[in-house]
Structures are given as C-alpha cells and as structure tokens.
Image (cartoon, grey):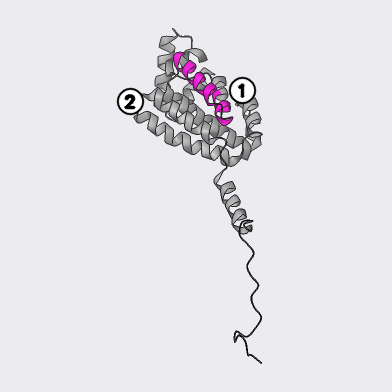
Amino acid sequence: EAIRIVSRAADGSVRDGLSLLDQAIALGHDKVTAAQVQEMLGLADRSAVFDLFDRLMSGDIKEALDQMQSMYRDGADPVAVLQDLLDVTYWITRIKVAPEVADAAHTPEIERTRGREMTEKLSMPVLTRAWQMLLKGLEETQRADAQLQAAEMVLIRIAYAADLPSPADLARDLTTKSQSPDPATPPASPTPSGNGGGAGAP
C-alpha cells in the first residue's frame, strides 16, 4: 500500500518515486508504512476521500465541509485532497465504462467495493461535470494564497451542482417545452376560405 501511494504521488516519474521512497525510508527508520507515507505527503485516507466524494455527490455540503476541516486538521493538504477527488472521479468513470477493471488483481479492496457502489448511483454526465469542476478548482486552489478556503469553495460549487440537471437534460426539456402548446395562448382563428374579395363576390 505504501508503494502504491508513492507511485501515485510520483505521477510517472521514476526519479520522483525513488526520491519519495528515500524520504519515507529515512523518516520511518527503514520501516515504511502507508500511514507514514500519507502523513509525509499530506494525503488523506482513501476511505475518507470516498466518503467526501459521496457527500459531495449527495449535495450534503455541511457534512462535506466538516469532513474537509477534519482531514485538514489531520494533516491533509487541500490541493492533495482535490487531486484525490479527481482520482476517485476518474476511477468511478473507468468502472462505469469498463466494469472488469475493478476485478484486476492490483485493485485495492476499498476502491473495488466503493467504486462499484458509486457507479450505480452516478450517471456519466454527473461524473464528467464533477471532473471538469475539480480540474478548474484544482488550478484555482494551487494559485490561491488561502488554499483551504479555495478548496472549500470548490466543494461548495460541486455540491450545489450535484442536483442540477445535465446540459443534455436541459436541452431536452427546452425542446419539449418549445414543442408543447402554451395553454395561455388562445388557439389561432381558422383561415377564411373565401377568395379574399369580400362581399359581392359571385
């Protein structure tokens, strides 16, 4: 588990991965654990990230903000939390597209079970919207002087958008309404059948 966390944090760079592993070994006096690596990197517990994502997608903003504060007090970096939420969004989307990836031997049990559970509750439009909002919010938070506040504002936007219809649903509703007759509009008068010549026509 510790190696998996280091690998994810290295983001494809072998040099960064080895450097992080060296730091972990030095801090742990030759014993490396997942909890120690998470603390070193300012990461949140994976189950807590899934819980946070679930609360966001349910629109439960108060609980989501309380959990974010708790994670921050435990040492989680706000930018790392948003990155973890992006990872969760991607993972759930992958399972939705290709369910067999959850059964891979290297998949941790929590990601297998929680991922499958969330694919049943979340639609693809909701997931893609969350991905876009998190990407934009991550950039904003990285640039912000007060990163915790910036991250919380990102969570608020996502939670309030969770119950909104997708753009496709909005377009479909607008199309349906435009094609339905307005009950307040009186029916049009029938077109007169004459030749337009008025009285005196033969």
Q: Is residue 55 magenta?
A: yes
Mark 1 closeness class: few <14, some 14–19, many ≥20 residues within 10 Å: few
Q: Amino acid at mark 2?
A: Asp
Seen as rendered, the residue at the extreme bottom is 202
Element on which disc 1 rests:
helix
Residue in the picture at 66% in, 34% down: 120
Mark 2 closeness class: few <14, some 14–19, many ≥20 residues within 10 Å: few
| Nearer the observer, 98 or 150 | 150
> With 83 as the anchor, is 184 left or right in this view?
right
Q: Which residues are magenta?
A: 52-74
Q: Give the main secondary structure of the magenta stretch.
A: helix
Quadrant where the N terminus sits is: top right
Q: Earlier in the sequence, mark 1 or mark 2?
A: 1
Cα–Cα gap, marks 1 and 2? 34 Å
Image quarter for residue 16?
top left
Q: Is residue 119 magenta?
A: no
Numbered badge on residue 110: 1
Number of marks present in the image shown: 2
**Residue named by callout 2:** 145
| Nearer the observer, 196 or 114 | 196
Quadrant where the C terminus sits is: bottom right
In x, y percent, where is residue 161? 52, 36
Residue in the picture at 61% in, 22% down: 110
Q: Is residue 22 visible?
A: yes
Tag 1 near tag 2, CB within 8 Å:
no
Q: Amino acid at mark 1?
A: Ile
